[in-house]
Amino acid sequence: MPADEQPGPHGAATASTAGAPRRLAQAALRDVPWEVGVAKPDPAVVVDDVRRTFGGLTAVSVDHLEIQRGGITGLIGPNGAGKTTLFNLLTGFDQPNSGSWSFDGKSLSDLGPHQVARLGVVRTFQLTKALSRLTVLQNMLLGAQDQKGERFFSALVPGRWRAQERANTEKAMELLGRFKLDAKKDDFAGTLSGGQRKLLEMARALMSDPKVVMLDEPMAGVNPALTQSLLGHVKDLREQGMTVIFVEHDMDVVRDISDWVVVMAAGKVIAEGPPESISQNQAVVDAYLGAHHDAPLTIEEEDQVLAEAVARIAEEEGAEISSDDGEKAR
Amino acid sequence: MGELLDALAIALKAGLGFQAVLFALLAVGINIQFGYTGLLNFGQIAFALFGGFGIAVSVSQWGLNFWVGVVIGLLAAVLLALLLGLPTLRLRADYLAIATIATAEGLRLLFRSVSATPVTGGTRGLAGFNRDFIALAPWETARRYSILGATWSGGELWVAFVGWLLVALACLLVWSLVRSPWGRVVKSIREDEDAVRALGKNVYAYKIQALVLGGIFGALGGMIYAVGTGSAIPDQYQNANTFLAYAALILGGAARVLGPVVGAAILLFLIQFADTGLRTLISNGIIPEGLLSSTDVAQIRFVLVGLGLMLLLIFRPQGIFGDRREVMLDAR
């Protein structure tokens, strides 16, 4: 698909200068079928057969998943679906029992978290990790990559890192200005409010010029006014050609900014497609609300459902949580 | 009154002597490890043990040059830091604490054991290895000098002088490190190491570097102490000294360049002053013999110092040099 090779960083950058954002990833994904594990025209991240179990619990079991480059991919699912575990696996914070995954064709398996970050895959955390006893500006400067002054012996010779430090400070101030944190640059990060910490964490991640940004619940605990500005910043990332993967529970947010949505439940990807396809998807509705959410059960039916559930567990294959079960029960 | 002034002079000597240098260097090392990087090294005295015995064994037992002994002591400390750090620093913070506290106690027992006697001299230790060093003093070392009301031997004076010089150099090194981007990374590791990993820094390597650097400072402290006392005896290196060094660090203010140095000097001053002061008061009859006898002083002085530290933590939790705002952030 040669036409689809274009929407790389450059394509997106020109799009942003042209005024109204052209959502290239959305356009590229228009003809992609709404199937689990479907191939994308230009995948940045590819996941294959990744499994992670904690004792008897299978937290993540993803057969195949591709993330479109330059787009915003929303990752949703009920609590305990394995979204954060998948994030941890992709960024090297956790090791899977089996499977492989790659970014830009380079395998990320067996890489430590810092090596993944150096390749340009940067994440934020569900519980914000502001470095409390460092100032906001120091937090930002930490994000810069390839700093000469971070090596032990170079650190002792200020001449070797001063210029780089000055350039990084300029860049940090520019970013802080965009995130409206520049007035706070000399405050300890620990004094910031929850929402400001989210902003700081995102700005800090951007200091490293990432190619893929993974945001774990960027809107959680943020007041509605700040949510709008955070949303704007996430859209900006796409305009600058970055690939964004984010976990979110607020469906309005997901519908607003995602080009593609991946739904997980019980460790598996149960649906994917553009945001408008998701709310009609029976598997998704079942995952969130249970397969029998809209019909009251009689005792006999309950027994029958229980028996079915037991049988299903015995088979150990939970793939058939489809709509016809629901029909039978009704 | 004059006797109290004498007690003050003796305490001042303790605060400036080579014992204070030992604690200052131990605490500077702990400051790098705990104050800046957040590593819990509860066996800092083991590094001092390696430093002191590095010289003692090399010179007294192997007949090597004094300076070769210094190098051996430092290499031993680096090796110890690597042995302790490589397996534990990938794990949660408490594993290093467990490994170091056990190692410090284990090494002391090993050095004083019968089987180690041919090398370390066992419980009696080694002596007579500091002649080459004392001989370097630019002044007469056999004479006694009176400074600030206390008498110092020329040798003591020389060791303390070189010791404080080393402390100054160590502080200079720490200062230039912590204001650099390297310092920023280790401070961030103290705050939240996962965040630092997510930003592409090799946290493990930085922790090892901090552990080794702090260990080298500890070894230097042990060397000064061994050279000052003129002997190296395993039981001098009780692990309680590690915790005294922690007390010195908290007293002066953690994560401040001069905090551990001033803390160590004040701590030793206070311990000595509590000791001689109490003895003076008892011998003068101001404290009745029935309430406190001079044999109790050795214990009571630590009670007093402990009380003082508790008051400090209540009213000035950041220590002498610390930043109160910074300490209060932890309360959240």
Image: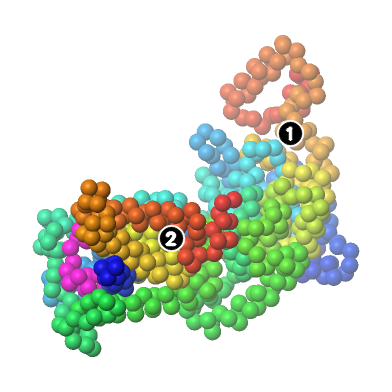
- Residue A93: give x, y in percent of width and height: 55, 52
Q: Amino acid at mark 2?
A: Ile
- Residue A306: give x, y in percent of width and height: 66, 18
Q: In the picture shown, does residue B61 fall above or below A223?
A: below
Of badges 2 and 1, the one in the foreground is 2
Q: Check disc 1 and report the residue beneath it.
A: A288
In-image side of A238 versus B209 (left or right): right
Residue in the picture at 61% in, 55% down: A129
Any mark on residue B250, and which?
2
State the residue in front, B245 or B251. Answer: B251
Quarter of the image for residue A264 reads top right
Q: Residue furthest bottom?
A: B138
Q: Amino acid at mark 1?
A: Tyr
State the residue in front, A243 or A3. Answer: A243
> Does the CB distance between marks 2 and 1 fall below 8 Å?
no
Residue B70 visible? The answer is no
Disc 1 sits on a residue from what chain?
A: A
Q: In the picture shown, does residue A160 fall above or below B28?
A: below
Judged by its main secondary structure, the magenta piece is helix
Residue range of the region highlighted in magenta in the rendering = B224-239
- Residue A280: give x, y in percent of width and height: 83, 36
Quarter of the image for residue A189 reads bottom right
Disc 2 sits on a residue from what chain?
A: B
Q: Secondary structure at mark 1?
A: helix
To the question of a shared chain for discs 2 and 1, the answer is no
Image quadrant containing the N terminus of chain B: bottom left
Residue in the picture at 57% in, 56% down: B328
